[in-house]
Image (spheres, grey):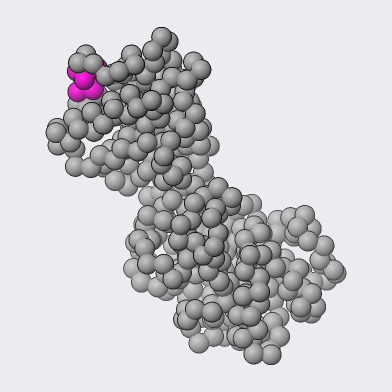
Amino acid sequence: MKDIVISENIKYIGADDKDIELFENQYKVPNGISYNSYLIIDEKIAILDTIDKRKTDEWLENLDKVLNARLPDYLIISHLEPDHAYNIRTIVDKYPHIKLVGNNKTFAFLPQFFDIPNLEERKIEVKDGDILDLGKHKLHFIMAPMIHWPEVMMEYEEHEKILFSADAFGKFGALDTEEDWDCEARRYYFNIVGKYGVQVQSLLKKVSSLDIQKICPLHGPILKENLSHYIEKYDIWSKYEVESEGIYIACASIHGNTFNACEKLKEILEEKGASKVVLADLSKEDFAEAVEDCFKYGKVIFASSTYNMEIFSPMRNLLLDLKEKNYQNRKVGIIENGTWAPNSAKCMKEILSTMKNVEILEPVITIRSTLKNIDIEKLNELAEAILK
């Protein structure tokens, strides 16, 4: 177990997973993922969440080492997703006396995953504002529904002023990885939690009056310094506000001609003084990165070839995913390409029109197969509109 210090009486017992290729079987995690679990040692002893089945043995070793032959009294179930809850039955079997602490939705869903013996006698059902007294340490329960499952709750420990934040404030990457928190936390947030901005805003209001000295999420590092930075990022993200004034060009090109047009637009924008222009080939770009960047930047160009009278699939998939994740409050440009019947602009508009406060800039550009001088004139017009 890596030496992660929280405090004398609150211990880290989680594990890094460096072998996993896809988190939730869809998100690339080149630097792995951490499954965080914590133990509070007091007059009563509480385990805060279990971890994924992939690291069960390591987790049990960590737990046994820190317990040092003592018996835990409670298992707090903050979130029932299997990467955090797989070992609930393991703990019940290992410690038959242990009490399970959750809310009404926790115990509604729990039987779908496990057959827990004597569940009615074993469970302690809590609601918003309830307190579990461990001795010096007291856990205040904060319901956080839809961040990002209905049963999610957080715990604020008043003695050491620690927020156990479930999946909130988490990120991709193992704990022994040195990397920028913002980038991987942003990719994690928008792909996993991003749909639920209203609920995140509600949570931020709930915790705004708390004196928080540390944040302990279920993925990613324990946050101890400059907490206002992380909270500010969550505030921006959950309001769907613009984080960066750069321009993101998302391109879905079949034979390269649409991508050539996007390269030309990038060149024009930079010549006109755009400080940051990011061009991505959606057929090669990590899909989760594309989603992240569409939310990060205030202005986005969607460029797609026409395919089967529709949108080329990498672009269609991106737009539908953005719609699902509540994409809003952006200015966008559209470029389509086609040889005999360009139609992707119409199809892209149909999806974008269902999104809140998404302004489509003029001109919408149609390219017939390859880039020509007349198209470059239109690209200049679009660049002017973007930069205005």
Measured along the vertical axis of the image, is residue 264 above or below residue 179? Answer: above
Measured along the vertical axis of the image, is residue 318 above or below residue 32? Answer: above
Specify the quadrant that holds the N terminus.
Answer: bottom right
In percent of width and height, residue 280 lies at 35, 38
Q: Residue furthest right?
A: 118
Q: How many marks?
A: 0
In percent of width and height, residue 376 lies at 21, 20
Measured along the vertical axis of the image, is residue 347 above or below residue 152? Answer: above
In percent of width and height, residue 195 lies at 51, 43
Answer yes or no: is residue 386 visible: no
Left or right of 202 on screen, residue 373: left
Specify the quadrant that holds the C terminus.
Answer: top left
In percent of width and height, residue 232 lies at 36, 57
Residue at 32% of width from left, 34% of height from top? 249
SS majority, magenta: helix
Q: Report the magenta residues as a range.
A: 375-380
Which quarter of the picture shows residue 223? bottom left
Left or right of 329 on screen, residue 156: right
Answer yes or no: is residue 246 visible: yes
Residue at 41% of width from left, 49% of height from top? 237
